[in-house]
Amino acid sequence: MNTRIISTLVSCVWLVAGGCAETVGDPQFLPVPPAGETAAASRDIRDYPAALAAVADAFEREFQLPRPQVTVVLFPNRRSFEEGLLTIGYAPEFARQSAMAFRAIGGATGVLVNDGALRGARWPDRVQLLAHELVHCVQYRFANGVRGTSEQWLREGFAEIVSMQVVERLGLGRYRRLREALLDPLADVRPGTLPVPLARISTFPEWAAAQGRYEVPLYSQAFVAAELLHEQHGSEAIVRYFRLFGTSMDKDANFTQAFGMTLAQFDREFMARWHLVLAQVR
C-alpha cells in the first residue's frame, strides 16, 4: 500500500462516521518482511509478522512466485474495515457490501484485513487467509499493478489452490482435508442445480455482488473451475495467464493463449467436472 494511502488511513483513526457512536478504530500496518527476517518454525507461528514471513518465503521457495512487497493493514472491526475501503476509493455502497461479504481484500500494494472477524481463528486458518490475499497482490503485480480484465473466478480459485498448498508445505494442515472442507458445502446443493455462469462472476464487482445471491457457494465453484485448469495445464500455465495481462487486456485472447481453448470451450468442460464433483461430495 503506498505512502499516500497509509497516511490517509492513519489520519482516519478514531473517526465517528455517519452519526454512529461506534469508533472506527486504529488500524495496524505490517509490511511483508524481507527475506531472512522474522524467521520462525512453521508450527510456531503465533503472530502476523511470522505468518507473513512464512507465506512470503513459501511463495519464493516452493512456488517460484515473486515475494509480495506490500503492507497488510489490520482493522479491529467491520466498521473500520469499511472505512478503510472508503479511504482507498471504494464507493460507499460497494465498500459496505464488500466489508460485509469479505474478511480481507488484497490489492496491488496491500491487503486490508478485518482482524475483528478473525478473533478466535486458529493461526493455520489465518495463514491460509493471508496466503490467499497475497496471491491476489501477486496477480496485480503480474499485470503491472492493475487488476485488468482477468477472470475473477480464476483469480479466486487459483488463490484457494495456492493458499492450501502453502498451508500444507508449512506443515500446518493437509491439502486434501482443506479441499474437502471447501467442497463440503456442495453436498447441500440440490441435485440438478447448475453453477453460476462464469461470465457472471468475471469481474470483482460481479463477484462481490454475487456473494449470498446464489445457492451455489462461489468459492467452492471457483475452486472446482481452477482445479480443472490446474490439472490440465499446471500452475505454470495459470501464472502465464496472469502475466499476459501485463501486455494485453484482451481476456479472451489471453485465455486461449494460456490454455489452448476458448472460454466457451472451457465452460463446457467445467460443466462436466461440476456434475462429477457434485456426485463425489454426495
Image: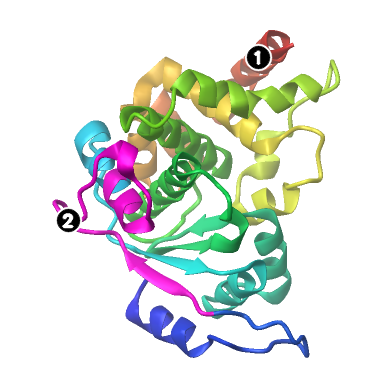
Magenta stretch encompasses residue 192: no
Q: Secondary structure at mark 1?
A: helix
Segment colored magenta: 26-54
Residue situated in front as seen by the camera: 161 or 33: 33
Q: Secondary structure at mark 2?
A: loop
Q: Is residue 261 visible?
A: no
- Given contact means CB atoms under 8 Å apart, are the residues at marks 2 and 1 in contact? no
* Three-letter amino acid code of the residue under disc 2: Glu
Give the mark, 2 or 1, whose residue is nearer the N terminus. Answer: 2
Residue 56 x, y percent position in the rendering: 28, 47
Q: Which residue is labeled 2 in the image?
A: 37
Q: Which residue is labeled 1 in the image?
A: 277
* Three-letter amino acid code of the residue under disc 1: Val
Relative horizontal placement of residue 255, taking residue 205 as reference (left or right):
left
Residue 167 x, y percent position in the rendering: 39, 33
**How many numbered marks are there?**
2
